[in-house]
Image: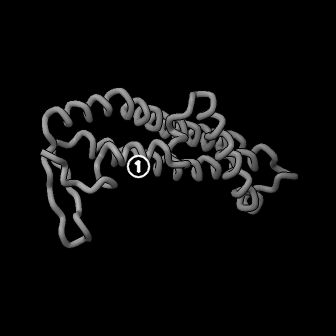
Amino acid sequence: MTCPVPKDQQPLNEYIELKEAFFYRWAKLARSQYLRMLLFMWLGFTIIFSPVAMSIESPSRHLWQFICVASIGGSVGLILPVLLLLSGWSHVKQRLDSAKIFYEESGWYDGQIWEKPEADLAKDRLLVTYEIKPVMTRLQKTLLGIIGFLVLGFGTLNIFS
């Protein structure tokens, strides 16, 4: 039986497109590259948030408080792209893991459901286990790390206040 799902809506093709997309492929980078990318994003958000931090704490009088506030702002900003990465990878994981696939033939009004053959389902679930779950675990750990950094930042801010 041939797959009636349009090529761009087939879970395997969605996975390939996601892992090759400029933004979403960051989650599959080597550990050092991934951490470097996170650091650069965090620094960017920290710099963007610095004017707000200056309005809260004067860097000339309270340097450490200013650094803490700017770092907290950078961390809050970093949560958004990580959540976006997590959302995209989670969507593809759900599509690959599911035995039934919802698809649209030509528009929003003609949705259909196709049940995957057992062999396709088994291949897709292997892909989820060995390719997508490690990415999801990495992103979840990253999110927990950012939250931990936020807690540390707020704790440090309270100590200096």
Q: Camera-side residue: 1 or 71? A: 1
Question: Residue 5 at what x, y percent from top left?
Answer: 22, 54
Residue pointed to by mark 1: 88
Question: Residue 65 at what x, y percent from top left?
Answer: 74, 47
| Residue at point 25%, 68% (across, down) | 106
Q: Camera-side residue: 96 or 118? A: 118
Question: Residue 104 at what x, y percent from top left?
Answer: 23, 63
Choose top left, top right, bottom left or bottom right for residue 150.
Answer: top right
Question: Where does the N terminus fall, quadrant-wise?
Answer: top left
| Residue at point 36%, 48% (across, down) | 14
Name the kind of residue labelled 1 in the image. Gly
Q: Is residue 118 visible?
A: yes
| Residue at point 17%, 32% (across, down) | 119
| Residue at point 19%, 49% (across, down) | 3
Q: Is residue 150 left or right of residue 107?
A: right
Element on which disc 1 rests: helix
Q: Is residue 161 visible?
A: no
